[in-house]
Image: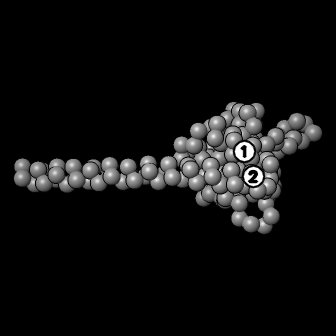
Amino acid sequence: MSSGALDFECTLTNTLIAMTTSLTIQQAAAATGLTVHTLRYYERIGLIDPIPRKDNKHRIYREEDILWIAFLLKLRSTGLPIQKMLRYAELRRLGNQRESVSERKALLEQHTLSLETTLAELQGNLVVMYQKIAMYGDIETTLK
C-alpha cells in the first residue's frame, strides 16, 4: 500500500510498542487497548482486513495491522462515525488511485473541520470555567 511516503494511517502512536514479529490476538488486544472481541468484530465488519492465520487457525497480527488499528483508534477517539470509518477502510483497500486518495483526503478534511469547530467550542467553554474558578477564588478570599 505504501510507496515510501508517510501514510497518515500508518503513523505510530506512543501507546504502541515497536514490533519485529507477529502478535497473537491477545497480544494485539494488549498493544492496542481493544478487547479480543472488538478486534474480531472489526475484522468481521471489514474495518480491518482479514488477519492472516497460522496453520492452527490462530490469527497473527502484523505490524501493518497494528498500525492500521492505531489509526482507526485515532479516528474513533475523535468521534468519526463507524460508517465513515468503514468507507475510509474501503477506499484504503482500493490503493493509491486518484479517486480513492481524493475521497480519503476529503473525508479527513471534513472531519478535521468538524474537530476544529468542536475544539473552538471547548476552548470557549474552558475560558468560562476559568472565569468561574477565579470568581469563586475571589469570593473565598472575601469570606476569610
Q: Which mark is residue 27?
A: none
Circle nearer the viewer, 1 or 2: 2
Residue 6 in percent (x, y) is at 71, 64
Residue 95 in percent (x, y) is at 80, 53
* Residue 102 position by quadrant: bottom right
Q: Mark 1 = which residue?
A: 89
Which amino acid type is shown beneath numbered disc 2?
Answer: Glu
Distance from the alpha carbon under mark 1 to that under mark 2: 14 Å
For marks 1 and 2 on the same chain, the one whose residue lies earlier in the sequence: 1
Residue 78 in percent (x, y) is at 53, 47
- Determine whether 60 is above or below 40 in the image: below
What crowding class fits label 1: few (fewer than 14 Cα within 10 Å), some (14-19), or many (20 or more)?
A: some
Q: Is residue 32 visible?
A: no
Residue 58 in percent (x, y) is at 84, 38
Identify the element where label 2 is drawn.
Answer: helix
> Which residue, as the protein is rendered here, is positioned at the far front?
99
- Determine whether 15 is above or below 24 in the image: below
Viewer-proximal residue, 86 or 31? 86
* Residue 9 position by quadrant: bottom right
What crowding class fits label 2: few (fewer than 14 Cα within 10 Å), some (14-19), or many (20 or more)?
A: few
Q: Residue at x 73, y 33 (%)?
A: 45
Q: Which mark is residue 99?
A: 2
Which amino acid type is shown beneath numbered disc 1?
Answer: Ala
Q: Residue at x 65, y 42 (%)?
A: 85
Number of residue marks: 2
64 left or right of 120 in image: right
